[in-house]
Image: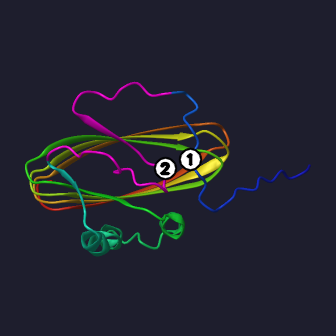
Amino acid sequence: TGVQTCALPISPMPAASPAGGALPASEPGVLRLHLDGSSDPLAGVSLPEGLQALSPGEIAQGLGHTLAATDCEHHWPVELNHAAASRVLALRVASRSQVKLELVSTAGAGLLPLRLLLVLEEKAELELSQRLEGAAAGLISLVLEAHLARSARLSHGLVALGCPEAALLGHLAIEQEPES
């Protein structure tokens, strides 16, 4: 019996175009962002009221904090993501705001590293849906860190589609204050 091997490029590759064609329009009140691991998903996008990008200082302060608090910053899928990710999508949901966000990513051959940092202020609500598609032999590496302040609410749904050669390594770390 022969052993079959498959070489997977470990350097980040450009995202492929969606295999299933164009997505239907997002629901009213939902902001759709396309994450490809290399370009700025917020470029040319007007964020809805209550949602804002974190400043570079806030990113430096918050990135990795939740991973450390949940004792998973050295798990190998997290380390792989950190070694490959060149961008982070870092967002804040303002206190008492209700935001609906859809994140869409399509990966071609190779590695697609996605890194997210979410901060929900007191009594903020975020409905987050993610659609990940592996269109070729490759790996999507997803690390999502979320900090929920008192009485904040995060609803997260993820749909991952792909061909038989595609793979997903996902890691979710959440730090919660009381009543969240």
Q: Position of residue 70 (x, y in %)?
A: 33, 68
Q: Residue at x 67, y 43 (%)?
A: 165
Q: How many marks?
A: 2
Judged from this view, the residue extending furthest toward the right is 1
Q: Residue at x 30, y 69 (%)?
A: 59
Q: Amino acid at mark 2?
A: Asp
Q: Which residue matches tag 1?
A: 15
- 29 on left or right of 150: right
Q: Residues within 10 Å of mark 2 (few under 14, many from 20)?
A: many
Mark 1: secondary structure? loop
Residue 63 quadrant: bottom left
Q: Amino acid at mark 1?
A: Ala
Judged from this view, the residue extending furthest toward the front is 44
Q: Which residues are magenta?
A: 22-49
State yes or no: residue 38 in magenta. Answer: yes
Compared with 144, 44 (above or below) is above
Mark 2: secondary structure? loop
Asked whether 39 or 68 is in front, the reply is 39
Q: Which residue matches tag 2?
A: 36
Q: Position of residue 145 (x, y in %)?
A: 33, 60
| Overall secondary structure of the magenta section | loop
Q: Residues within 10 Å of mark 1 (few under 14, many from 20)?
A: many
Q: Position of residue 33 (x, y in %)?
A: 36, 43
User: Does the CB distance between marks 2 and 1 fall below 8 Å?
Assistant: yes
Q: Residue at x 26, y 35 (%)?
A: 30
Q: How is the image coloured?
A: rainbow
Q: CA distance from mark 2 to mark 1?
A: 6 Å
Q: Position of residue 2 (x, y in %)?
A: 90, 51
